[in-house]
Structures are given as C-alpha cells and as structure tokens.
Image (tube, rainbow, N blue to C red):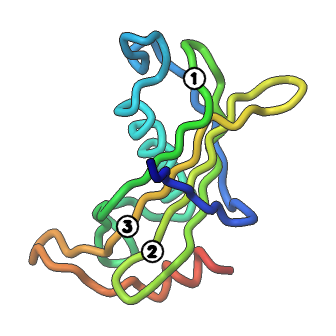
Amino acid sequence: MERIKINLPGTFSFSTILHIRITDLNYGNHVGNDSFLGLIHEARQQFLLDNGFTELSFAGTGLIMADAAIEFKKEMSYGDAVKISVAASGFDKLGFDIFYLLEIVHPEKNIVAGKAKTGMMCYDYATKKKTAVPEEAIFKFTT
C-alpha cells in the first residue's frame, strides 16, 4: 500500500499550543481523524489572524480549502498539550499550501504526533469564482 508522505518546510513562522479535549476522542480513546482536521483548522485560523488575515478576509479575497493530507505518527490523548507549527509555501497564481507539524509537548523532548498539508485556493465568495493570490499575502508569508 502506498502511503502519504508530507515533506515539511525547514522552518515554521508560527506555532500555537492546543489541548486535547474529551470531545476530540473517538471510540479508540485517542484523537479521531475528524478532530485532527479540526485541530489544524484552529491552528490555521490562529496563523492567519497572527498575519492580519481571516479565511473570509484575505487581503481582499477569501480562502477555500481545496485538499487536505494527513500523516498520522502517534496517538494523541485527552489532556495532551499539542504544539502545532504552521507555515505557508508553494504559492502559485490561485493558491498555496499550508503545512502543519503537530507535536505532543513533553518536558524532555516533544513527540511528533502528525504532519498535515492543506491546499488553499483564493476564492471570491460573492461571485463563487477562484481569484489570484494577493501580492500582499505572498509578501507577508515569504519575507
């Protein structure tokens, strides 16, 4: 079986710490795949806000998720503090990628719990059409 392999960027410009809630757990008593996606969604929102954007106000346009990939590495459990590092790269005319590194915080050394990538497209919600990536956003994320 061919597995997804996510090649993360060498540096991350933002990180946040989220705690695993009881509602994030599935029947296996660990974070479910749907909650994993929710964690990276929250980290993306914080990342965008830290850069002066939102998904609906992205330098004059909006953002919509075109795809998502997740590489699970370690179970996350109730109460775990999870450091999520975020970076944007791979800009083209209509979109870019956001990468995520999830690590369970431990005093000795953080443990990689997973990697993820979301493909983001610039989107005009009023006209329901794809739009070009604003130069302001490219500049902000690449300098």
Amino acid on which the number 3 mark rests in the picture: Met
Question: Vertical placement of 109 versus 100: above or below?
Answer: above
The residue carrying pointer 2 sits among few (fewer than 14), some (14 to 19) or many (20 or more) residues within 10 Å by Cα, namely some
Q: Is residue 1 above or below residue 138?
A: above
What is the distance, in whole Å, between disc 2 and disc 1 at their CAs?
28 Å
Report helix, strand or loop for mark 1. Answer: loop
Disc 3, disc 2: CB below 8 Å? yes
Q: Is residue 34 left or right of residue 126?
A: right
Q: Nearer the viewer, mark 2 or mark 1?
A: 1
Q: Earlier in the sequence, mark 2 or mark 1?
A: 1
Tell me: residue 137, above or below residue 63: below
Left-right relation of 107 to 48: right
Labels 3 and 2: the sequence-earlier one? 2
Measure the C-alpha gap from mark 3 to mark 2: 5 Å
Q: Secondary structure at mark 2?
A: strand
Rendered residue at 74%/63% (across/down):
11
Q: Residue at x 38, y 16 (%)?
A: 26
The residue positioned 58% from the left and 84% from the top of the image is 139
Percent x, y of residue 45: 45, 50
Q: Amino acid at mark 1?
A: Met
**Where is residue 102, by image quadrant?**
top right
Numbered label attached to residue 96: 2
Question: What amino acid is at disc 2?
Answer: Phe
Q: Secondary structure at mark 3?
A: strand
Q: Which residue is mark 1?
A: 76
For the residues labelled 2 and 1, say whether their Cβ atoms are less than 8 Å apart.
Answer: no
Q: Which residue is mark 3?
A: 120
